[in-house]
Structure formats: structure tokens, C-alpha cells
Amino acid sequence: MSILETKELSHDFKGLWALRNVGLQVKEGERHAIIGPNGAGKTTLFNVITGTYVPSKGNVFFKGNDVTKAKPNEMVRLGMGRSFQITSTFSRLTAFENIRMAVLSKRGIRFNLFKQVDKMNDVTEETDAILKRINLDGERDIPASALSYGKSRSLEISMALATDPDIVMLDEPTAGMSRDETHTAVELVRRLTEGKTTVIIEHDMDVVFSLADRITVLHHGEILAVGTPGEIEKNQEVKDAYLGEMEV
Amino acid sequence: MMNKTTKWILWSVLLVFLIIYPLVFGIYYTNVFVTFAIAALYAVAIQMLLGFTGFLSFGHAMYFGVGAYGTAIALVHIKGLPLIVSVLFGFASALLLALVMAPLVVRLSVTAFAMIHMAFGMLAYTLALKLRNITGGEDGIGAFPIPPLRIPGVFSIDMTDPTNFYYFAMVILGVSIWILWFVTKTPFGCLMVGIRDNANRIDYLGFKLPQTKAVLYLLVGGFAGIAGSIFALFQNLISAMELYIMHSFIQIMQIMVGGIGSFFGPILGAGVFAVLEELTSRYTQRVELVIGLILILVIMYFPTGLIGMYHHFKTRFFTRQAD
Amino acid sequence: MDATTAMYVAQGLHGLAYGMILFLVASGLTLIFGMMGILTLAHAAFFMLSAYFSYQVMQMTQNFWLALLIAPVVAGIVGVLCERFLIRRVHVMGHIGELILTVGISLVILDAVKAIWSTDSLYVDIPECLQGLVSIVGMEYPIYRLFIIGLALLVLIFMALILYKTRLGMIVRAAVSDADMVNALGINVPLVFMLVFGVGTWMAGVAGVAIAPILTVFPGLADQMGMDAYIIVVVGGFGSLSGAFLVSIIFGLLSSYGVQFVSQLAPILMFIFMAIVLVIKPVGIFGERE
Ligand SMILES: Nc1ncnc2c1ncn2[C@@H]1O[C@H](COP(=O)(O)OP(=O)(O)OP(=O)(O)O)[C@@H](O)[C@H]1O
Ligand SMILES: [Mg+2]
């Protein structure tokens, strides 16, 4: 059963078709990687699915509902979490406050003007537990903007997960990381997304092949291939696409 | 961090200070203090919008003004209206205006928000001038009855007495400021700073941005209205002048001078302005020039205001000790 | 042609002239914002300042053309100085910093103007050759209004030519879309920006001189014009010249026909128009999502 599915999804940026007839299928419980050269349309696909843009054509289905026109907050409420390629945390808030924001949302505390948040012990406990799980308990009270790059990426990833979504969309969680940092981040992603439906955009092939159950390859806004890591590794078209890109 | 005892001592000292102030300083300075306290509530309300949530408004004088007109007009037309109800009239009028404006403005960008408020602020000013039979135009509405504060059969306190009014104003303004402070400490307060830092992420955490902003907008409008209402009672006069765009700028300046993003900054700023106004009006007519120059200097050299400077020096002082 | 039609046409012409003036101010504003990302509230103050300068030049020389030449340039220079020494430094703080700073500048200019020229309305004469009416196909038009329309068109065509047909324009447009790249090519980007700011201010200055004989020169001039210009930029969409043009003309016509039909409520028409547009499209008619 596909938990997330797109049908003939196309998106047009003033004449530039960043997506063309994309039919993505994500099965419940799998880790699904999306790969493709720079500018292939991966982030745009995420943006269209998660509600940043309404697609020019086609539809998005999530848990069987047509969510083509749903806004980001509606998608989150339906059970979708998302991280960004460019870190998007609350820069002036501490690591703790960042995560707490997600915890509040998860618990449906949205318009509470009558109780001090510091006095909500369960919220504090849950937030601290999450910080511990992502090894940020040492940086609890440091503003997000002052975290090391690796740590801020961890924060970014766990914000997507802290709302306890049914599906999590990670846009290049290892973007801009050193080899070591990448390793730590990949382990974090592996640990946090255990058993959770995950869609992950990733450039590093080693990472992709070690993490993903299935892979969709995007090229010039179109799906080039879908398959298991083994199938994709052997696919000549995919190799050509990547090689062709390198020659340019 | 302050511990609980010092905190209580500080609050008690403040309370005692507020209680004995009129007895020590006399009527003139008591009135100066009420003016300052009204400005403080107004500035704190605007700070909720500007410093906490990141929305600049150049037109909130309309909420202050509508609050003031609401109270004044109610007192002119309704005989025997209790004092508290007249304040509620001001609050409700401002709230009503905010309710009408909210759907219009909550989806705007920061920039458009600022501009639109300037435009509507000017419109409100023009209307206050033109709708003479309701607002009294340039002359405004004055000399309306100020009801005593009373519970029938229990007590009745004359509010035309400056000292009595001082205590009344302190309670209303103090409670209002406390309510706003409390809101900043709630989950809703977290949302506000979240919107300021990264509205997109707030959306992507499942919070409804427009609705959240709308609630905040009502809150700010309503409390600016209370400030206006107390102002009308205090002056026993409200005219279109109070809606002039200048009165939207002054609060922003108080916030900038005190410290943008800090809750107590605007109160400090309002205090500085109260003193400055006392001094400048003695020496010069050029209030605009002075304010303009202060704005330029603050934004160029102390963009974090007095509170920011305090933190700056505190850290420096402590790091030096640590060496 | 009967009297009613003539009246409509005359009102339309007034609206068009006012709209063109609005557009001169608004296009400078949207140029500065759209190209440099600087949000300035001092624009209207420069517009007013130029009107005062023109009054001063007229006082000294009795020559309107000299005023038209000198006043906007002086206003532009004041603008450039403000940009160089003040605005540029708070640019990193974002729009709130710019808005507050430019409000400060406006207040200082406003008070300086009051101190130098008092708060009275000052009268500037229409030059003799532009006085009176001219008749075209059986209709009488006030020459000065036609002159304003022509002047505005001239300035705008001139601007468009520079922007799209010259090397300088190319550099400006490139600097706007990728400042670092152009910087790397050895072109002084801050200088280019300063120039754009100066030109934008100069355009407002031209409008200030042109409007002076019609509205007279007084400290409230900045409020009256500035407000309209800012609304136009918001409603048209930040940075959109075509949006600014469309809305300027609509506002011009609204205000002249509005005075005709609903007199007292004329200014409110614009606000209603603004409200409708922003409810439907919060980023303005030609605005793009921020
Ligand atoms: N907001 C936008 N407006 C116009 N064009 C856009 C926009 N966003 C993306 N594009 C274009 O759409 C194409 C796809 O971009 P996208 O960001 O989806 O690629 P990507 O696969 O995520 O690349 P990368 O690996 O670099 O992150 C690119 O050509 C890009 O320039
Ligand atoms: Mg991408």
C-alpha cells in the first residue's frame, strides 16, 4: 500500500518545468531515497508534496486523501514531517526551545494563553528526552545559531521527527557536512527513522545504498528509474545521467 | 538568575514605591507618572507585535484612539455608566476594529504590514477629523462625565481626584501589563517568537500562521485600546490629534530605545521618553527634530537599545572577572 | 461636444496628470526597493524637500526651468548622502532597521523645513508659457496639466532607455540580480546602488517641482503624496514598475472622479481599493510571493 503517492505531478516556474509527470510511490514503512543530479527537481518535488507550492498539474495523495492543495500546516497535522536542505531552525531560540516548539505542536497545544509553558512538566520532560536522544542535551540552552554545523543539522532533522509524523521527508540531511559529520548524521537518521516511513533526498551514493529500501531517480524533473539499490546500481540510464552531468 | 526571595523583595519594593509615589511627589509628578504608565502599556502592547513577533506597525495609534473614543463616546451618551464598563467600552471598540482588520492584514509580509498600517492609520486620522458629529473633529470630545468608582451601597471613590485616579490607573494598567507579560510565558508566547524567527518553520510544525497572528493582533489591539481608554479618562479629552501618525512612531521609538525584543524594554523606553519630554518641552519646540535624531542615533549605534547595552556591559564585566 | 462630456474629459485629464506625478514618486520608490531591496520611508520627504528647493530657486531667479533643473538634483544629492552615510549601514539589520531609520530622517527633514521656511503654504507660479488653456479637437485643456503628463512621460522613457539600452543599465540590472558576481568583475556595486538611490530620489524630486504650483508648498505635502505613493507600491506589488504604473493611474483617476462624485469621501476610495486588492492578493497586483 502506498502511503504517499503523486500522479502526473508537474510544476512550472515561469516556463521552466522543474517537475514533469512525476509519479512517485512511497510504501508504508519503507525508506525511500530520491536521488538525482543538482537541479533535478528533488527539492521542488518536496515543496509540492509538503504544500509550499500547489503543483501546476497533477495530484498528491497522502493516506488515500487528495492533498494537492493542502498547506504545510495541514500536511503536518495529517502526519507529515519535513526537514530542509538549508537549515531552517529558530535561530535565536535555544536548542531546547526549538524542540519544544515541535513537542507543543505534537501535543496539540497551539492556542494556550493560560498556562506558563515552563510549568508544563510533561512537555519539558519529553523535550529533554528528545535532546538526549540526539545528543544535544549538552547544548540544551545554546541558541540554535551558535550550534556547530553538525549539531544544527541534527536539530533540523529532529524537528521534523519531533511531531511524531507517520511519514518524514528529509531533504539532504547531510548537506554541507564533512565526512565525519556525515557519518554521525547518517547514524542519527538511521536510528531515528527506524520503522518509520521515510523519504530522503541524498547525494552521497554510499549513504543512499546503505540506508534506502527503494530509490527513485529524478533527472530534469522526470523519473528516470525506480528500484531497489541493487537495481539502480546496475541501471545504465542512471549512470549516463550522472556521468552526462559531470561532463557538462 | 534571580532567586525567588530577591524577586519577591523587588516586587514588594516596586509595589510600595507605586503606593507612596503620589504622597511623596505631589500632583504634578503624579500626573506625569500616569502619562508614563499609559505610554508603557501602549508600548508593551506594540512590543508584542514588533519585538516578539517581528511585525512593525506604523498605525497602531488607531487602536489607541478608538479605545479612547469608545470610552469617551460611551460616557457622553450613556447616563450613569459605571467606570469599569466605560473602560470595557474602549477595550471592546478597539477589539472590534482589530477583528475587522485582522483578516486583511494577517497574511501580509512584514513590509506590507507596516505600510498598510500607516495607510489605515492615516485614514483613521482623516475620519476622526472629518466625522465631526461623532468625534468632534479637531476639538475632539471633552468634558464628558468621569464616573466615580463604586459598588452601590459599599463604596464610591471620586475619580476626578488625581490621586484616586492614579491608583485606579495603576491597577488597570498594571494588570494589563501583567497579562501581556504572562502571555509571553505561555505556549502562545513561544509561537510568537517562533514566528519572528522563522515563520515558515512554524507553518511546517503544523501551526496555523494566519490564525495565530490574528489572535495576537486582537490582543495587541485590545490592550492598546485599554491604554487609550485610560488616556481619555485621564485627560477627560480625546481629539483627532491622538490619532496622528506621530503617535504611532513614538511607541516604536520607545521600544527601540528601551530594547527591541525584551518585555521590559518598552517600559524603560517610555520612562526615558517621559523624562526627555519633560526636559525638551522646557527648552525647545522641535520635538520632531529631537525624536528624529534619537531614532537615527539609536538605530545606527545602539540597535539593541538600553536593555541590549545593559546585557552587553554585563557580559563584558563578567568575562573580565573570569580572566 | 457637450458640457458633461467635456467635464468628464477634463476630470480625466486631471486624474491622469495626478496619476503620472504619483507614478514618478512611486516608480522611484519601487526602483529603490525592487533593485536594492531598500525600504525607505524618507522618499516622500525628499519629494517635499525638492518642492521647497524649487520654491527657493524661484524666489532667487524667477526661473521655473532653472528650478526644475536644480531642485531635483539637489534633493538627489541629499538622498545620496543619506544613503551613503546612514541607510547603507543599517541595511544588514533588515527592513525594520531601514524603516525606522528613514522615519528618523523624514522627521529631521520635516522639522528642518519648518524651521527654515515656516509652516505656511508657499506659492509657486506656473511659468507664463505654460499658463492658460490650449484647445485640441474642440476641447480646452489646461496647458500645465498636459505639461506634467509630458514631463513625467519624458522622465520615464529616459529612465527606461538608460535601464534597458545602455551599458550602465545593464550593469545596474546585473548588480541587482547578482551583486557578488558583478563585484567580482571589478565593478563598484555600492557605487552603482548609490547611483540608483540618487536617481530614484531625483525622480521624486522632479515630481515635487512639478506639483508645487498646483498644490502649493507646505510641510504636509510629504504626508499627502507620500501616503499615496506608498500605498501604490504596496498595492501594485513591491518592485513592480508595471504594477506601480497601473495603480498610479487608477489612483489618479479615482481621486479626480472621486472628488467629483463623492467629494468628502474621495480619499477613502483608495483605501477601499487597497483593501479589496490585498484581501484577494496580499502581495499586490503584480507582486510575487516573498
Ligand atoms: N522558486 C523557484 N523559482 C524558479 N525556479 C526554481 C525555484 N526553485 C527551484 N527552481 C529551479 O527548478 C529546478 C529544480 O530545482 P530543485 O531545487 O528542485 O533541484 P534539486 O534537485 O533539489 O537540486 P539540488 O541537488 O541542488 O538541491 C532548478 O533548475 C531550479 O533552478
Ligand atoms: Mg535540493
Image (spheres, helix red, strand yellow):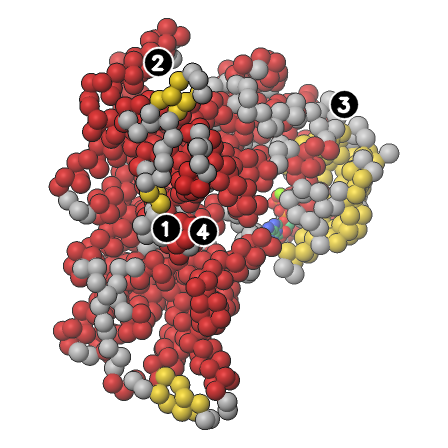
Q: What crowding class fits label 4: few (fewer than 14 Cα within 10 Å), some (14-19), or many (20 or more)? A: some
Please give the name of the residue rendered at 41% of the width and 61% of the height, measured from the top-left corner. Answer: C229
**Residue A135 location, x and y as percent?**
57, 17
| Extreme residue toward the top, this view | B5
Residue picked out by circle 3: A195
Task: Tell me the CA gap for discs 2 and 4.
Answer: 39 Å
Please give the name of the residue rendered at 22% of the width and 68% of the height, measured from the top-left corner. Answer: C122
Q: Are marks 3 and 2 on the same chain?
A: no
**SS at mark 1 in the image:** loop
Residue picked out by circle 1: B136
Task: Tell me the CA gap for discs 3 and 2.
Answer: 53 Å
Task: Tell me the CA gap for discs 1 and 3.
Answer: 70 Å
Task: Tell me the CA gap for discs 1 and 4.
Answer: 20 Å
Please give the name of the residue rendered at 46% of the width and 38% of the height, measured from the top-left corner. Answer: B78
Q: Quadrant of the C terminus of chain A?
A: bottom right
Q: Chain of mark 2?
A: B
Q: What's the residue type where badge 4 is placed?
A: Phe
Q: Nearer the viewer, mark 3 or mark 2?
A: 2
**Residue C160 location, x and y as percent?**
43, 72
Q: Give the mark nearer the N terminus: 1 vs 2.
A: 2
Q: What's the residue type where badge 2 is placed?
A: Trp
Please give the name of the residue rendered at 44% of the width and 36% of the height, measured from the top-left corner. Answer: B79
Q: What's the residue type where badge 1 is placed?
A: Gly
Q: Chain of mark 3?
A: A
Residue picked out by circle 4: B120
Q: Give the mark nearer the N terminus: 2 vs 4.
A: 2
**Residue B43 location, x and y as percent?**
37, 34
